[in-house]
Image (tube, rainbow, N blue to C red):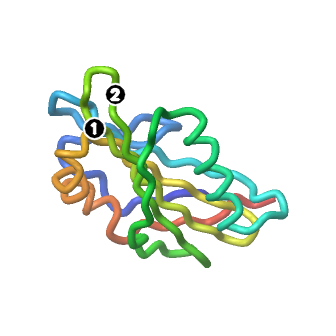
Amino acid sequence: MGWSFPRIPAKWQVQEGLGLQAQEGDFPSSLAATQESLGGITLPEFVEFQINMLKNYLRDPAIEPVVPLRISGGEETLALDVRHKTKDGKELVYRRIYARNANAVGVLTVTALASELPQVMENLAPALNGVSFQRAAA
């Protein structure tokens, strides 16, 4: 139960319990896959809570909605990009993709340099096309 990916992209490696990580490039792009209980709140409320947490954690993040992926098992989906600059001036993007199934939410987080995000998303296509999320049995 949880996240299921149809294929692992070439030059990406499974990080057990975490997700996937690129095996090339100057910055180690990654795809983290997590699952949490909504605890009686809605998916938009959960995402708003996460946005507020990121605003407290990151310095001057730019947060904007993006079109979510199609996720099998996702009764409701949302997605956003969180951009911020590192101390050395590089712009990082966290693309967060949320999928609700009953009272559980799955979160996919793609982390990449902003300049590399289009290529990273293209490289991840084998894993993301046909991805599914099913809540773990209670």
Q: Residue furthest right?
A: 40
71, 80: nearer the viewer: 80
Q: Residue furthest top?
A: 88
Looking at the image, is mark 1 or mark 2 earlier in the sequence? 2
CB atoms at circles 1 and 2 under 8 Å apart? yes
Q: Which image quadrant is residue 25 in?
A: top left
137, 43: nearer the viewer: 43
Q: Which image quadrant is residue 125 in?
A: bottom left
Label placed on residue 91: 1
**Circle 2 SS class:** loop
11, 40: nearer the viewer: 40
- Give the image location of residue 105, x and y in percent: 65, 60
Q: Classify 87 as above or below 82.
A: above
Q: Is residue 105 left or right of residue 99?
A: right
- Give the image location of residue 80, x and y in percent: 45, 60
Q: Residue at x 34, y 27 (%)?
A: 86
Marks counted in the figure total 2
Q: Residue at x 53, y 37 (%)?
A: 17
- Give the image location of residue 98, x and y in percent: 54, 62
Label placed on residue 86: 2
Looking at the rendered structure, the kind of residue marked 2 is Thr
Label placed on residue 13: none
Looking at the rendered structure, the kind of residue marked 1 is Glu
Q: Which image quadrant is residue 70 in?
A: bottom left
- Give the image location of residue 111, x and y in percent: 36, 42
**Circle 1 SS class:** strand
